[in-house]
Image (cartoon, grey):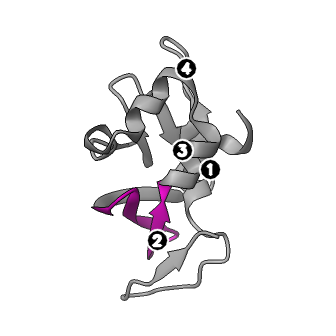
Amino acid sequence: MGNGIHISQKGKVRRSHKKAEQKNVILTSAKYLNDYKILLSFTSAGMRLSTLVNFLPLFNKYVKGENLKYLDPQRFRKFIIKNGNIYWGRNEDVIFPANLLIKQKATSLSDKEEILYII
């Protein structure tokens, strides 16, 4: 799939964590807020960054077939942070790499956090 969003098939090797490491953007934590909104916290070059992401448009655009089951609110809340990315499913069925979830023009945030919105 385009734009670095990976919808995996069982048994395939995933390269999304390598891309995140290359950009030095690592997803460190995530907190479900409501609906399909998750507050993501990143580290990048010693900076702490936070961004509020509405995953509904991303799911509607990139997730197809049997993976649409993760749009169910109960399943959506069961995301996992691993290798600096966020994913759904034991087999990493839906993966969103960290470097695509953070706004590219992030400013330096030494000791404070700021919410950046993806447009």
- Nearer mark to the viewer, of 2 and 1: 2
Crowding near pointer 4: few (<14 within 10 Å), some, many (20+)? few
Is residue 5 in view from this perspective? no
Give how far across and how far down residue 32 sits, in percent. 29, 59
- In what quadrant of the picture does the C terminus appear? bottom right
Residue drawn at point x = 62 percent, y = 50 percent: 22
| First along the sequence among labels 1 and 4 | 4
Identify residue type, mark 4: Val
Labelled disc at residue 59: 3
Q: Residue under label 2, please give it.
A: 51
Secondary structure type for disc 1 = helix
Q: Main secondary structure of the magenta part?
A: strand
Q: CA distance from mark 4 to mark 3?
A: 21 Å
Labelled disc at residue 22: 1
| 107 lies left or right of 89 | right
- Nearer mark to the viewer, of 1 and 4: 4
Crowding near pointer 2: few (<14 within 10 Å), some, many (20+)? many
Residue drawn at point x = 49 percent, y = 11 percent: 11
Of the pair 77 and 101, the residue shown nearer to us:
77
Secondary structure type for disc 3 = helix
- Nearer mark to the viewer, of 4 and 3: 3
Q: Residue under label 4, please give it.
A: 13
Q: CA distance from mark 1 to mark 3?
A: 25 Å
